[in-house]
Image: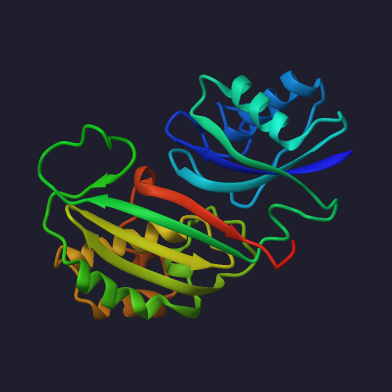
């Protein structure tokens, strides 16, 4: 039995999320079905993150265990052939140690949220970005975001359906910048609460629109109350961008 680490890129639009769902297609099901077609084995895919319906990935790390003797490159090519026409691609594949785990060995996760700040309708980025018509002050958003960096109780930014045992998380980075008509939010942490990134982005957008003063981000955080949340951003603009592992893992 060989454990293979996969790096996945996918468009989350057609899926109910990364994890298998009883009520619709998932990224996990697409990869596991492709692996069965290639190897004849029923495998279980484990991933570094659990993205919701409509959330995308540029470099999601995952792993599967395969008994069949097959080289990593051959497995990657075969999986990609079987994944069509699903919008999922295996960007890299490598054999790893049996105790390496895509989720439990992961020590850092990064996300990017893309807002397109313009009046004209989206064409090429429809379903892949959040369109905000009102002008956004990205610098004000960045300043307000710094109140969330560090170790805090993120109850305000936590979904009511979150299954995490504690609302305490450590946010290592939360940066906002403008790139032309796009406003980009980038964040890094060991782990996140359910809907935490989308909730933070939604409130930052209110700051950018001038509907919230910058200080209200800190006030919302200290409230530790979901009722203090101003807005939950849609999934369209959210991308899982990377996972970190210990050196040599």
Question: Percent x, y for residue 75?
Answer: 72, 30
Is residue 44 shown to the viewer in this render? no
Q: Residue at x 15, y 63 (%)?
A: 209
State whether residue 13 is above or below residue 156. Answer: above
Q: Nearer the viewer, residue 236 or 231?
A: 236
Question: Percent x, y for residue 162?
Answer: 56, 56
Q: Residue at x 61, y 56 (%)?
A: 163
| Left or right placement of residue 212 versus residue 14 in this view | left
Is residue 154 shown to the viewer in this render? yes
| Left or right placement of residue 145 versus residue 41 in this view | left
State whether residue 20 is above or below residue 181. Answer: above
Q: Nearer the viewer, residue 5 or 223?
A: 5
Q: Write down the quadrant of residue 44 in the picture.
A: top right
Question: Percent x, y for residue 18?
Answer: 57, 39
Q: Residue at x 20, y 36 (%)?
A: 122
Q: Write down the quadrant of residue 26 in the picture.
A: top right
State whether residue 222 is above or below residue 66. Answer: below
| Left or right placement of residue 70 versus residue 30 in this view | right
State whether residue 167 is above or below residue 83. Answer: below
Question: Percent x, y for residue 88?
Answer: 53, 31
Q: Nearer the viewer, residue 67 or 172?
A: 67
């Amino acid at each position: 039995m060989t454990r293979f680490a996969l790096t996945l890129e996918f468009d989350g639009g057609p899926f109910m999320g990364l994890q298998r769902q009883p009520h619709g297609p998932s990224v996990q099901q697409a990869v596991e079905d492709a692996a069965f077609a290639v190897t004849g084995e029923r495998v279980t895919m484990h991933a570094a993150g659990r993205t919701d319906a409509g959330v995308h990935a540029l470099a999601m790390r995952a792993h599967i265990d395969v008994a069949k003797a097959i080289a990593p490159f051959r497995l990657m090519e075969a999986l990609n052939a079987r994944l069509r026409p699903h919008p999922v691609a295996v960007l890299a594949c490598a054999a790893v140690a049996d105790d390496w785990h895509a989720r439990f060995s992961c020590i850092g996760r990064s996300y990017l949220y893309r807002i397109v700040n313009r009046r004209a309708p989206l064409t090429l980025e429809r379903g892949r970005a959040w369109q905000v018509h009102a002008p956004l002050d990205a610098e004000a958003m960045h300043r307000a975001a710094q109140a969330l960096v560090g170790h805090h109780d993120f109850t305000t930014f936590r979904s009511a359906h979150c299954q995490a045992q504690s609302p305490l998380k450590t946010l290592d980075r939360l940066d906002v910048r403008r790139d032309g008509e796009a406003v980009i939010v980038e964040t890094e942490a060991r782990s996140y609460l359910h809907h935490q990134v989308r909730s933070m982005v939604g409130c930052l957008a209110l700051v950018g629109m001038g509907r919230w003063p910058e200080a209200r981000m800190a006030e919302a955080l200290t409230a530790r109350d979901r009722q203090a949340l101003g807005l939950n951003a849609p999934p369209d603009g959210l991308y899982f961008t990377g996972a970190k592992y210990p050196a040599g893992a």
